[in-house]
Amino acid sequence: MKNLKLSFLAIFLIFSAKSQGQVGINTAVPQATFHIDGGKDNPSAGAPSTSQQLNDVVVTSAGNLGIGTTTPTQKFEIQTGGTPASPVTGFKLADGSQFKDYVLTTDANGVAMWKRPSLMTYSGTFVPGGTGSKVKFQKDITFYTTGAYIDLPPGIWKVDVILLIQHDVFSSPLPADTWLWVKASFSDNNADGTGNLTNDFNSGANRLASTLFQGPSTGPADKNGILQGTIILKNSTVAVKRYYLVVGDTTVQNPVPAANLKNVGGNEWGENSIIAYPLSQ
C-alpha cells in the first residue's frame, strides 16, 4: 500500500511538472518551481497571503530558497512573521561551535561557524627619525610629517594617537616660563606644509590631538611629555587609504627658537602608537 501511494505521488509530481513547469505539494497553484504548502492552507486560486506563506517552502527558477515566503529575493531567505515589537526567531545552527553570546563568522571562503566576537583594529607604522628637529619652541603654523602612517579600509574610524614628545636638551635649555602647545593630525600626503590636513574628518570635532609642553628643561636628562588624543576619520573611497601623521601648528609663550623637540613620531619611542577602531563600515 505504501509503495502504491509513492507511485501515485511520483505520477502526480511528474504530471504537475510537465503540465505547469512547476511542482506543488499540498497546493494546486505552486508559486515557484518547487512549492510546499506545509500548512495546507493556501487558496485554490491565486497567491497565498503573507500569513499563509509562513508555513511554505519554495525554490524559485533563479535557485533562491524561501522559507516563510514564496518570493525570496536572496539565495536563502527566511520570513517568520516577526516584527520589531514582537520578533520571531527563524534560524538555528548547532554545529558544536555555538556558545552564549558568540557571533556567526566566516573564513575567507565563506565557511561559517560560531566564534567569540572580536574587535577589529588597525595599527599604524612608525619610521626612524620622525620629524627630526623641525618642531621648535616658537610659533609656527606648519604641520611637519613624521613619516608615520596608518592604512584604513572604507568606513568611519576612531583613531587613538599616543606620542612621546621629548625636549632635546642639547638644542637649548628651556626656562620655567616657556611652554609649547603642539598639535597632531593626519594628512593625505607625506610632506610638510600649511593647510595640508586631510579632508576625511567625520565632523568638525575630533580633528586634532594636542598637548602642552612646559619648561623648565635644563638637563642633564631630556624632559619628556605625552601627546594623546582621538581623531575621527572617514574613508569614503572604495579602497584602503593611507593617512600620514603630521605634527606642528605650534603656539608658544616665551619662545626659544633654538630649542626643539626630538624625533616626534619616530619609532625610537616605545610609547608611540596609532590604533584605529571601526565606528561604522
Image: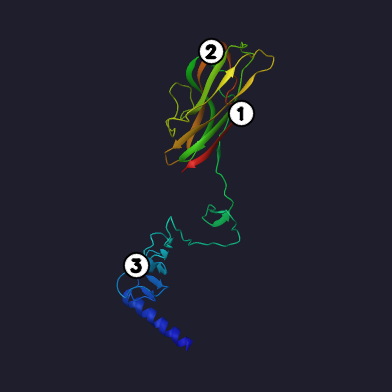
CA neighbours of label 2 inside 10 A, class few (<14), some (14 to 19), many (20+)? some
CA neighbours of label 1 inside 10 A, class few (<14), some (14 to 19), many (20+)? some
Residue under the image location 56 percent in, 10 percent down: 256
Residues under numbered marks 1 and 2 in contact, where contact means CB atoms less than 8 Å apart: no
- Looking at the picture, does residue 2 appear above or below residue 181? below
Numbered label attached to residue 253: 2
- Residue 10 sits in which quadrant? bottom left
Numbered label attached to residue 27: none
Residue 149 relative to residue 172: left or right: left
Q: Which of marks 2 and 3 is nearer the N terminus?
A: 3
How far across and how far down the image is residue 123, in percent? Answer: 56, 37
Residue under the image location 58 percent in, 19 percent down: 213
Give the alpha-carbon distance from disc 1 to disc 3, as whole Å.
Answer: 66 Å
Identify which amino acid the numbered label 2 is placed on. Answer: Gln
Tell me the SS state at disc 1: loop
How far across and how far down the image is residue 137, in percent? Answer: 55, 14
Tell me the SS state at disc 2: strand
Looking at this view, name the residue that lies furthest to the bottom: 1
Give the alpha-carbon distance from disc 1 to disc 2, as whole Å.
Answer: 29 Å
Residues under numbered marks 1 and 3 in contact, where contact means CB atoms less than 8 Å apart: no
Residue linked to disc 3? 49
Tell me the SS state at disc 3: loop
Residue under the image location 49 percent in, 16 percent down: 140
Residue linked to disc 1? 267
